[in-house]
Amino acid sequence: MKIRNIITAFAGIAVIASCSLDEYPYGFYSEDNFYQTAADAEAAVNYIYDAITYIEYSRAIVFLGDMNTDALSPKGDAAAATKELDTWNLNNLRTNTTLGNFYKYSYITINRANAVIAKVPGMTSLDESYKNRYIGEAYFMRGYSYFCLARNFGCVPIHLTPVTTIEDTTVPAAESLDELWGIIINDFKKAAELLPLYGTPITGRTDQAAAYGMLAKAYLYIASAKDHGAPQYSNMSHDVDDYYAKAVEAAAKVVDNAEQTTYGFDENLLDIYDVSKPTGPEHLFLMSMDVTGETEGQYSKISKMYIPYISGATIYIKQGDTDEYIASHDGWSEYRTTDELYDSFETGDRRHDWLIVDKVYDADGNVVASVDDGKLTYPFCRKFIDPNFSGDKTSTKPFLLRYSDVALVYAEAAGPTDKAYELVNYIRNRAGLANLATGLSTDEFREAVLKERSYELAFEGDKCYDLRRWNKLHTEITAAREQGYTAEDLVFYPIPSLETDLNPNL
């Protein structure tokens, strides 16, 4: 069975599409007649990005990054998989559907990237600049997917070439975290070498700045994990101080580089989350979703997940400390802000006062529901609001990498240098807060940056990973602490049982 176009790529598992031995197994593709034209190459690269827009993946970003911490809680009748993650039910996580889907779509992305890396270099019809760009994007997305897998599952199977046979699916896991993170770092380095720096960001696509930003995050992750004694990371061979320095060097390409003028801090906190400004200076890597899409994934329902159900009608949200109000639908009450997070902000922090909503209005500015009157069941995140919604359809997008994130990576890795203070203080001042205290030690400064990350990046899928690399999951997540889990219990999720059942080498 030959198929002209690329079909669904390897999903990390070997599922057979037909009993006929003459059929290809589902998840593999034929490319005999593909990769002929520039349009083919462009389509193949778009196909890589398409894999992460599936709702099973995009929603898992929140479930694995925030819902499993004390920042969010699920509604009472949430799906079993959500409750298992929220309560750290380790007995059921091997069969948890959210983890299984996240794992699966990560490998779909990897295999689609591997196809581009394998095929595009030999395309004689493609201009060299486009060839480098497409290959660079493929390296970025492969590195990004392994980065996400490593943070969640530890040593996972390594595929660096396209999967074309059943036998290709049963490779063993990486021998060590050194091997796995080495591949991640090399992929981001190759991406940075090959990708251009765009004058204007391309929504849903990556460029050189994003590659350097993710390279910095990778270096910081493993440096800090070893520094703080996270299980298994303690045995990695790298030098902690050297990797902190490498994180600074890579992040500096984005936040301390006079030649890089595309990205920077957005002066207005609300503008960062203005759905009509996806090419704003903060957005190094943003998913591509638009209200005009035909199916979910092409459009987004993310906003529905954060907002409580109120009346089924249009609600209005106050814009900061102005008298302006913007429209929104109400929602499904899936991602509920906890009192623990809501009450922990410093007084006057705009990220609390402006970005977490405790009352909603009608079109005339009259309060129709609030936390105080009980009609609003919890204060909700408004980072994902689209006033131009169409029914359940919106253009809201997950924020996969922001300039402020890279700035905080730089600051944490560098310690209390003048530049690090400058970056953190800009973020605090934008939020209406005073500068950090001066004279902090390296450990004190890094702890302050970690705390700043919990507020600046709230609801953006980073909280759990920050706690994991700081070896704090077992002490700072209530459900884990109450069950007496150790750091070893929580350092990684188990690889899904469907994968281990089908792969005898795992």
Image (cartoon, rainbow, N blue to C red):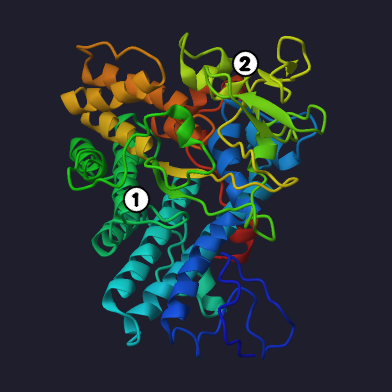
Q: Is residue 506 visible to the viewer in this orientation of the structure?
A: no
Which sits in the foreground, 14 or 55? 55
Q: Position of residue 496 (x, y in %)?
A: 61, 53
Determine the residue positioned at 46% across, 34% down. Answer: 271
Q: Is residue 269 left or right of residue 330?
A: left
Q: Position of residue 47 (x, y in %)?
A: 52, 68
Where residue 369 sits: x, y (%)?
A: 75, 18
Residue drawn 62% across and 45% down? Answer: 59
- Quadrant of residue 234 within the rendered picture: top left
Label 2 secondary element? helix
Q: Which quadrant of the view contains residue 218?
A: top left
Tell me the element at label 1.
helix
Depth check: give the residue in front, 17 or 412: 412
Is 337 positioned to the left or the right of 232 in the image?
A: right
Expressed as whole percent of the image width and height from the top left, the position of residue 54 reads: 62, 56
Which residue, given by chain and number where applicable, does mark 2 sit on? 339
- Residue ranking furthest to the right: 311
Determine which of the numbered discs, if any, sits on residue 210 in the image: 1
- Judge whether 136 appears above or below 54 on screen: below
Residue sitting at x 44%, y 28%: 269
Q: Is residue 132 above or below residue 310?
A: below
Residue 340 vertical placement versus 1 (above, below): above
Quadrant in which the N terminus is drawn: bottom right
Q: Is residue 141 left or right of residue 169?
A: left
Q: Looking at numbered disc 2 in the image, what kind of residue is underneath it?
A: Asp
Q: Of the residues under marks 1 and 2, which one precedes in the sequence?
A: 1
What amino acid is found at the position of numbered circle 1 in the picture?
Answer: Ala
Instruction: Please name whichever residue, 439 or 299, is drawn nearer the observer in this view of the structure.
Output: 299
- Determine if residue 219 is in view: yes
The crowd level at tag 1 (other Cα within 10 Å; few <14, some 14-19, many 20+) is many
Instruction: Quote the CA–CA distance across marks 1 and 2.
Output: 34 Å
